[in-house]
Amino acid sequence: MDSAIALADLIVFFGQAVKRIFEAVGKFGEQYDARSLEAFVEEQMKSVGALILEAAWRLRMKGRPIPRNLPCVCGHVKHGMGKRPVTVRGVLGTMELEERYYYHCDHCQAAEFIGDELRGASEFTQLAEERMALAGKDGAYARAAVLLERLGVIRVAASTIRKVCVRLGRRIRANLDHEAARQHMLELKPEEQPRGLAIGVDGTMLGRIDPQHRRRRSRKTGRKVRGKGELSHFFQEVKTLVIFSFDRSGEAVRKTFHATQGRVDEFRDKVALEAKKRGADMARTLIFLGDGAPWVWKTAAELFPQAIQILDWYHAVEHLWTAGRARFGSDQKALWAWIESRKSELWDGQLEHVVEALRRVSQQLGAPDQSLSQEARERDPRWIAHRAAGYFDDNRSRMDYPRYRAGNLPIGSGVIESSCKHVVGDRLKRTGMRWDEEGAEDLLALRCLDLNERWDTLWPLTSVA
Ligand SMILES: [Zn+2]
């Protein structure tokens, strides 16, 4: 198409849109009210915008040299296979990318396009995909679809939003894996030079389904497993990381997160990576907050030997509650009184008293039954009390709360408690929600990228891959 004619056409289209808008304003009070009028103008401007962008993009491509071949990373070349026009859906509407050229390497099968840059990884534009991901990461996919349509962004199925979230989440994860694997070689510039930095690790349980599990089971037994069999539903731990800088009063300033269902060693690498990004090496005071799991303190000691280890206040108190309930059961009055006394002892650093009280509870309940299975021990009051006493005894050095308070160090009362909820719970643990492993991981990656104020890295990141 002659570009001069295209430009003249566009002006005509634009003029028509302006005319339609003027006519609509003329019918204000009759056919249109304020709301529908503005929506009409928005729709008109978008459709003209799509035409203008489409034409301008075509013009840009016409002025660009189209080489016959492109070099390939494998050492061979990608051969030009000619024009491959494509239709894309964006937030302005549908556009035809006519001047789009396909290249293919016969040696390694790598493919590349020229003139494809507006597109995301699907039939949508990058901006449309980004907005789908924004809506999908925070709300149920079906809800996100409704929201996007009502906001006039795009009309797509919930399953499309899910696919986009999974794809973008996967890119983020791949990039993180890449960074984590090469963090010793990469010149990672810390984002800040914090005076005080705290690293907190926690875990939360996520409802999961495993369709493979069901299929495996059915193969084994030879029987068809129907419905949502019990085996396909289970709970999986999500490990969460929160890193925050804190001010002189110990208040959290900026928080960044990571969350994964992955193995301890994978998680550990991401903890190291995020700490590096947050400038842990330069922090004058480094705190490591966590709960009792041995791998947590092992990670802390290996990665951050200089850090002050603190058993976060939230979990310490939670352990008191567990022991208290084992002792007092439904006697709320006695339970509360007991908890209040232990809390104030803990707060004042009278750990002797806390441990003594827990030993007393353990004695009152009686010696734990050695014949119980590990699972039964989790619910058995004698075992609970016995273990609580040992837990507080073992962690004395991490519960010197008066000293931490005097130094205005964070003890993780609010931040640790809210981090799991913030990253995982608010989106993935709503009533009835069950996830397959990959879907949950991808969504966690998207959520963290946004919460960590790195959302803008999404596109440079995804278009490189
Ligand atoms: Zn190649």
Image (cartoon, rainbow, N blue to C red):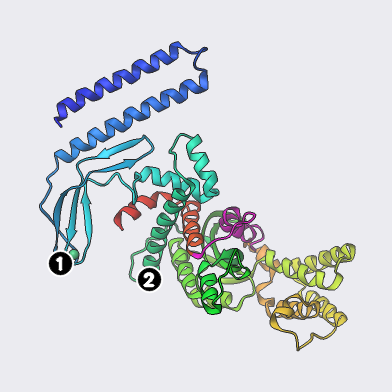
**Three-letter code for the amino acid on which mark 1 is drawn:** Gly
Residue 198 visible in the picture: no
Q: Quadrant of residue 175?
A: bottom left
- 203 or 87: which is nearer to us? 87
Image height of 144 relative to 199, above or below: above
Q: Could you tell whether 65 is left or right of 222 in the image?
A: left
User: Which residue occupies the foreground of this view, 421 or 168?
Assistant: 168
Kindly identify which residue carries mark 1: 75
Horizontal and vertical percent position of residue 13:
28, 22
View extreme (bottom): residue: 371
Image height check: is 452 above or below 35?
below
Give the vertical position of 223 relative to 114 (above or below): below
Identify the residue at image location x=50%, y=54%. 447
Q: Is mark 1 within 8 Å of ligand 1?
A: yes
Whichever of callouts 1 and 2 sits on the residue coming sooner in the sequence is 1
Few, some or many residues within 10 Å of mark 1 (<14, 14–19, 20+)? few
Question: x, y percentage for residue 455?
Answer: 43, 50
Q: CA distance from mark 1 to mark 2?
A: 25 Å
Task: Find numbered disc 1 in the image and state the secondary structure of the residue it sits on.
Answer: loop
Residue pictured at 32% horizontal, 42% vertical: 88
Instruction: For the N terminus, give its image quadrant.
Output: top left
Q: Could you tell me the amino acid type at mark 2?
A: Ala
For ligand 1, the image quadrant comes to: bottom left
Residue interval drawn in magenta: 411-437
Badge 2: how crowded within 10 Å, few (<14), some, or many (20+)? some
Residue at 37 percent of width and 63 percent of height:
188
Dot 2 falls on a residue whose secondary structure is helix
Does the numbered disc 2 mark a residue whose Cβ is under 8 Å from ligand 1?
no
Is 420 colored magenta in this rendering?
Answer: yes
The residue under label 2 is: 181
Instruction: Decide which of 19, 282 is in the foreground and name it.
Output: 19
